[in-house]
Amino acid sequence: MNATIQAAAVILTLLAIPVVSSAQTASSLTRAEVKSRLIQIEQAGYNPATADPYAYPDNVQAAEARVTARQGAINSNGGSVPCSSQSARPVLREE
């Protein structure tokens, strides 16, 4: 009888492994999505290297709110946010 209980426990454990292993993959983000989100938050003014550790939640939440507001502005008017990057060519102005 003891062997029967042990066999049943082993079978139940083997049947439960696939359920547990696939439970976390349903809503996980990809590495690229996480990296993109971090870059957006840093562009919104949050710098993890110089951030005050005591104000961490407030600072990162404020940066996330700026990112969300910026994305809302892009989606509402169909435009894009001005880019701060510059090309190697100078801008020629007509006078």
Image (cartoon, rainbow, N blue to C red):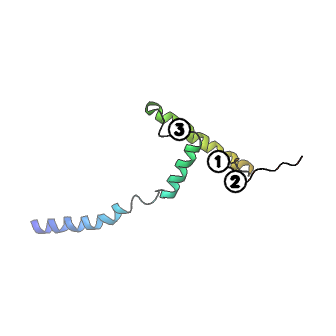
Circle 1 or circle 2, nearest the eye:
2
Could you tell me the amino acid type at mark 3? Gln
Q: Where is residue 19 in the image (x, y as percent from the top left)?
A: 35, 63
Q: Is residue 14 left or right of residue 78?
A: left
N-terminal label among 3 and 1: 3
- Mark 2: few/some/many CA within 10 Å (<14, 14-19, 20+): few
Q: Is mark 1 on a helix, strand or loop?
A: helix
- In depth, the one of 62 and 12 nearer the eye is 62
Callouts 1 and 2 close, C-beta under 8 Å: no
Q: Position of residue 45 (x, y in %)?
A: 57, 39
Q: Earlier in the sequence, mark 2 or mark 3?
A: 3
Q: In this view, does 66 lie to the left or right of 2?
A: right
**Amino acid of disc 2:** Ala
Instruction: Give the amino acid type for the residue marked by disc 1 in the picture.
Output: Gln
Give the quadrant of the N terminus.
bottom left
Which of the two residues, 1 or 6, is positioned nearer the viewer here? 6
Q: Which residue lies furthest to the right in this view?
A: 95
Across and down, in percent, residue 21 comes to 35, 62
Q: Name the residue under label 3.
A: 61
What residue is disc 1 on? 71
**How far apart are the two marked residues, 3 and 1, measured between alpha carbons?**
15 Å
Q: Distance between the residues labelled 2 and 3?
A: 35 Å
Residue ID for mark 2: 88
Dot 1, crowdedness within 10 Å: few (<14), some or many (≥20)?
few
**Which comes sooner in the sequence, label 1 or label 2?**
1
Q: Nearer the viewer, residue 50 or 1?
A: 50
> At x 15% / y 65%, what residue is drawn?
6
Q: Nearer the viewer, mark 2 or mark 3?
A: 2
Which element is circle 2 on?
Answer: loop
Give the side of residue 92 with respect to residue 34, left or right: right
**Quarter where residue 10 is shown:** bottom left
Circle number at residue 13: none
